[in-house]
Structures are given as structure tokens and as C-alpha cells.
Image (tube, rainbow, N blue to C red):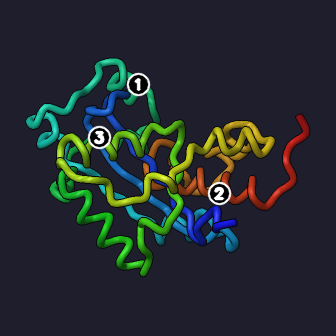
Amino acid sequence: MGKMFQDHLGVIDLETLGVGSDSAILSLGLTVGRYDAPLSFDQLVSGGLYLKFDLKEQLQKGRKKSDRVIKWWYEQKPEARKVLIPSPADVSLYRVEEYLNRYFQSIDLDIKKVDLYDRNSFDLTKLQYLFEEDLDKDVIWNYHNTFDIPTAFRFMGFERYAGVWADDVPGCTYHNALHDAALDQLRIYKVLHATPDPL
């Protein structure tokens, strides 16, 4: 039987201004590590990728925003809401392939040989739409190496957050894309290296 999983897993999280595939994307967080060598939250964050995107450029190109989602953002903690503030350091969403390739080169991994996880298939589908519809090219990861986190947890006997909450992790800002990716990777490590909760 062939190898079922890669040696490394990555978690992608996006913060957006809507729920549709053409929604404006505020930021991207990505963490990567080995399955068999769990990392701490601080290690995941320090070794991860964080991109904050130019929102004005996206809206000019026709990406959508939702009044309901904007209202939701203003109900979040001030630290999380910082993503809404424009910065000269914001980068173009339409160069995301370049940034992802550069990151994976820096950690000496091939993105096609990394299992990628996201929550509820919410983030990777948006990136797929960006590549295929906006950039008119194929995605740079392997479609067959993508997985939905809550589904994986359910089949391992855990609830959708594996009993790990942002408030449990010192320094974690909920709805910061990089912190949320690291938090979900901690949950994956817990599920893989712990005894399932009784049903």
C-alpha cells in the first residue's frame, strides 16, 4: 500500500470580509511542521508565514465585502481588529503564489509534498478560486493532500476544537490568521498524540 500521508502538515487560515469565494481577503496565516514532532504555539508562530493584504486593491478589482461580516469584525477584540487598518506594509493578494513559493523555499519543502489543512474547507477553496478564477492558473499545492480539520477530528473521536481554546494558549489572539493556524495545528497534534475522548 502506498504512503497515505506526507511527513509534514501545514495549516492555512484566512481572515476575510465575506464568506463567498470572491470575498476580499484581509490576511493569511500558515504554519508547517512534522506530524511526528509536535511544535509549541510560539515555535509555530515564529516559523510561520503571515501576510496582510492590500484591501483597497482587491475592492477595486471587484472582490466583495459583506456588511454582516464587517459588523462581526467590529464585535471582535481590538487586537484582532487591527487587520482592518491599512498599512504601507500590506502586500498584493495577486502575488500570493510568489509569497507562498518563497516561504516554502525558505523552509526547504515542496508545497506539493505537504498535507494542507483548513477549517471547514473555508480557506483553501478561497485560495483555489483566487488561483483559478483571478490568476487563471492551477493551484500550486496538491489537491489530494488537503483536509478539513473538524471532519478529521470527528472521525478520530474528538469534538471540532479538540478541547483546545484560544484563551488556553498564552499570547494567542483569536482571529489573527497566523495565531489561528497555529492553534489549529496544536489541536491536530493533540488529536494525533492523545487518547480520544469517550463518545
Spatial separation of the CA atoms under disc 1 and disc 2: 26 Å
Spatial separation of the CA atoms under disc 1 and disc 3: 24 Å
Secondary structure under tag 2 reads helix
Quadrant in which the N terminus is drawn: bottom right
Q: Residue at point 78% right, 61% down?
A: 193
How crowded pointer 2 is (Cα within 10 Å; few <14, some 14-19, many 20+) is rated as many
Q: Does any portion of residue 112 appear in the rendered image?
A: yes
- Please tell me whether mark 2 or mark 3 is closer to you in this view: 3
Residue 99 against residue 180 in the figure, above or below? below
- Label 3: which residue? 129
Q: Does any portion of residue 83 appear in the rendered image?
A: no
How crowded pointer 3 is (Cα within 10 Å; few <14, some 14-19, many 20+) is rated as some
- Label 1: which residue? 72
Q: Nearer the viewer, residue 175 or 160?
A: 160
Secondary structure under tag 1 reads helix
Rendering coords of residue 189 (x, y %): 69, 59
- Report the amino acid beneath label 1: Trp
- Label 2: which residue? 186
Rendering coords of residue 25 (x, y %): 29, 41
- Report the amino acid beneath label 3: Tyr
Q: Nearer the viewer, residue 140 or 170?
A: 140
Q: Nearer the viewer, residue 146 or 4?
A: 4
- Please tell me whether mark 1 or mark 2 is closer to you in this view: 2
Rendering coords of residue 133 (x, y %): 21, 40
Q: Earlier in the sequence, mark 1 or mark 2?
A: 1
Residue 34 against residue 164 in the figure, above or below? below
Q: Quadrant of residue 6?
A: bottom right
Rendering coords of residue 162 (x, y %): 72, 44
Quadrant in which the C terminus is drawn: top right
How crowded pointer 1 is (Cα within 10 Å; few <14, some 14-19, many 20+) is rated as few
Q: Quadrant of residue 155?
A: top right
